[in-house]
Amino acid sequence: MSILKIYTDGACSGNQNELNIGGWGAILEFGDNRKELHGGEANTTNNRMELTAVIEAFNALKRDNLKIQVFTDSSYVANCFRERWHVAWEKNGWKNAKKEPVENQDLWQALLSLVNKNQVLFYRVRGHVNIDSPNTNLESHYTKFREMNGPGFTYEDFLYITKMNNRADELANLGIREIRITNNEG
């Protein structure tokens, strides 16, 4: 069975401010087919955009029961699934370890509904790695990538995944620019 690969990123300009603009980007790859998605919204947060990127990627799927690998630079998203935070949240009535309501519960519930229809693995990627700069220690980044995700990735895999994460970041920033244009902010 072929594996669908999804690369996502979220961004927020003015994060944690009252007036901010967020964007999200996603790339779906299945065999030789690739689809890029992006969007944005005002008055949001970086975490909401990270979640939205993954949700929108899943919403673009035409069927369920797929094997999917999700690559994200969001530890918030990746760790929720890798460490199974959502299991405790659901068991505790959507309260976190501090007995407070889970932030972004609406998006988490939407994402869980989509993830549960497929066989999904989440992988953590370091964001904003300039693979073209001679000053970037790619070997060190590769070692860290393997520490986070296991030894099943070659150096070439790492370079490609990093390139796709950078492209997802570009798409997220495109979403921010489009919202600014829509809001006449230039």
Image (tube, rainbow, N blue to C red):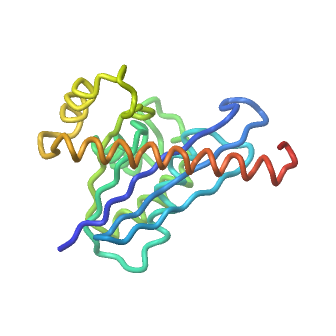
Among all residues in the image, which is located at the extreme top?
135
Q: Quadrant of the N terminus?
A: bottom left
Give how far across and how far down residue 151 sits, in percent. Answer: 12, 40
Give how far across and how far down residue 97 sits, in percent. Answer: 41, 32
Give how far across and how far down residue 36 sits, in percent. Answer: 50, 62
* Residue at screen point 48% across, 56% down: 26
* Residue at screen point 37% across, 62% down: 115
Looking at the picture, tell me which residue is in the foreground, 186 or 53. 186
32 sits to left or right of 172: left
Among all residues in the image, which is located at the extreme bottom?
63
Q: Is residue 85 above or below residue 1?
A: above
Q: Quadrant of residue 185?
A: top right
Q: Quadrant of the C terminus?
A: top right
Looking at the picture, tell me which residue is in the foreground, 40 or 129. 129
* Residue at screen point 56% across, 51% down: 171
Give how far across and how far down residue 108 sits, in percent. Answer: 48, 52
64 sits to left or right of 144: right
Among all residues in the image, which is located at the extreme left?
151
